[in-house]
């Protein structure tokens, strides 16, 4: 599959590395590809402009900081994103460590702004290392999906599988409105990280014992 | 221990039943104890006025609906709550299913309004049945604690243990500011409940595999 990752940070690099390892054709998109492409940590990747990355992908992945995402996507424009699957992994946390989308979500905002793009929110409740290496956990965690388009969610499930997330570990929460759950969990994520002294953990849904 | 539970709903009754079973001296507080005390589902409990319930408890438990809690606590007054441990299990969700305390928390608001009361937030990420019967889960889940007072958290840990939450399942997130994590997880809780068709689940923190 052709994947255009928007962003060149930890998250973008982790996902690029994971999906490339699974045989996908991956590029990273940057506002300043010449400059960023020379950076040591990006040496192994193909870094192109944002519009080119969007054009490259059957699937476009928003791996930009959540507070910057709408600006980046607006620059790319609706035409370049039309008909694509967009996997959104961003969480908007401001410099004051507050959610940029209280009682709402970045995932919903992207879907509302780009109605001809099928947005799927996922991977918002784990850090970049766990995203691409769920086997680093003591036992399988749960990874969540939110989106209005069933085909786009099927594609996303396959891509999660390629990163090592077993099908049984993937939980479809429902429509894109449920992206709120994934994004609002950021506060609990940070509290747990501080408490256990590690970011490389995951939440797991423990079900009721069968009656 | 003497426990005054504020509220007479599902949560208050579940906790009252659990703690009474562990040998504690529990009363439930209601705005209209005469009227409520006659209700079938409350027949087995002692229902008193709110002020009397607060006076009864070495530990006072806020089990009122999150959107009503500040009104109830204001009626009781700071003097009646001074020097007590307050275990707050409320989540403020409005009729529109939005958090009443975005980028903030009910736990913090209570602590700020009652500085001479030691507030501990806990049990906000599970439903009433799981609160008092964590053994109903397929495997142990994680229950979180947030609070500024170490003694109050120790007392709360013991009370969680009395409900069946093993010490290893209890995760201290830090100060009362981390109540945000527990309360903001309400969106994810609702999404998961809708997805799996059950409220009787729990989140569990899955740690990184030891290096």
Image: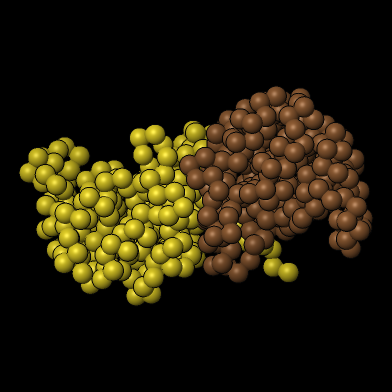
Chain colours: A brown, B yellow
Residue at horizontal 39 percent and vertical 70 percent from the top: B148
Q: Residue at x 58, y 55 (%)?
A: A94
Q: Nearer the viewer, residue B81 or A33?
A: A33
Count the marks: 0
In terms of depth relative to the viewer, which is nearer, B141 or A72?
A72
Can residue A148 be seen in the rendering of this structure? yes
Looking at the image, residue B115 lies above or below residue A185: below
Q: Position of residue A8 (x, y in %)?
A: 80, 52
- Give the residue at x 77% y 36%: A76
The correct choice, above or below, for A14 with respect to B192 in the image is below
Residue lying at the far left in this picture: please name it: B34
Q: Is residue A177 left or right of residue A57?
A: left
Q: With respect to residue B200, does B22 lie above or below? A: below
Quarter of the C terminus of chain B within the rendering: bottom right
Q: Position of residue B92 (x, y in %)?
A: 36, 46
Of B8 and B178, which appears nearest the observer?
B178
Q: Residue at 11% of width from left, 58% of height from top?
A: B52
Considering every residue shown, the one lying at the far bottom of the view is B151
Q: Quadrant of residue A168?
A: top right
Tell me where residue B113 appears, x and y as whole percent.
Answer: 28, 62
Residue B27 x %, y % = 17, 55
Q: Is residue B80 above or below residue A79?
A: below
> Split into 4 quadrants, where in the image is the N terminus of chain B?
bottom left
Q: Is residue A87 visible?
A: no
Q: Say whether residue A88 is left or right of residue B4.
A: right
């Amino acid at each position: 599959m052709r994947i255009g990752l928007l962003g060149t940070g930890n998250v973008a690099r982790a996902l690029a590395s994971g999906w490339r390892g699974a045989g996908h054709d991956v590029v990273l998109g940057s506002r300043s590809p010449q400059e960023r492409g020379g950076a040591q940590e990006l040496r192994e990747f193909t870094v192109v402009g944002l519009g080119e990355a969007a054009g490259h992908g059957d699937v476009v992945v928003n791996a930009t900081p959540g507070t910057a995402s709408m600006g980046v996507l607006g620059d790319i424009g609706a035409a370049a994103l039309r008909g694509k699957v967009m996997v959104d992994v961003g969480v908007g946390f401001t410099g004051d460590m507050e959610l940029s989308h209280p009682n709402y979500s970045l995932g919903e905002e992207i879907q509302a702004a780009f109605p001809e793009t099928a947005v799927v929110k996922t991977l918002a409740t784990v850090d970049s290392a766990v995203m691409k290496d769920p086997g680093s956990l003591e036992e399988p965690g749960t990874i969540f999906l939110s989106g209005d388009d069933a085909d786009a969610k099927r594609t996303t499930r396959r891509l999660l599988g390629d990163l090592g997330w077993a099908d049984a570990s993937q939980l479809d929460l429902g429509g894109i409105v449920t992206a709120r759950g994934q994004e609002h969990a950021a506060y609990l994520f940070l509290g747990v990280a501080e408490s256990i002294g590690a970011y490389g953990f995951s939440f797991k849904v423990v079900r009721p014992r069968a009656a």
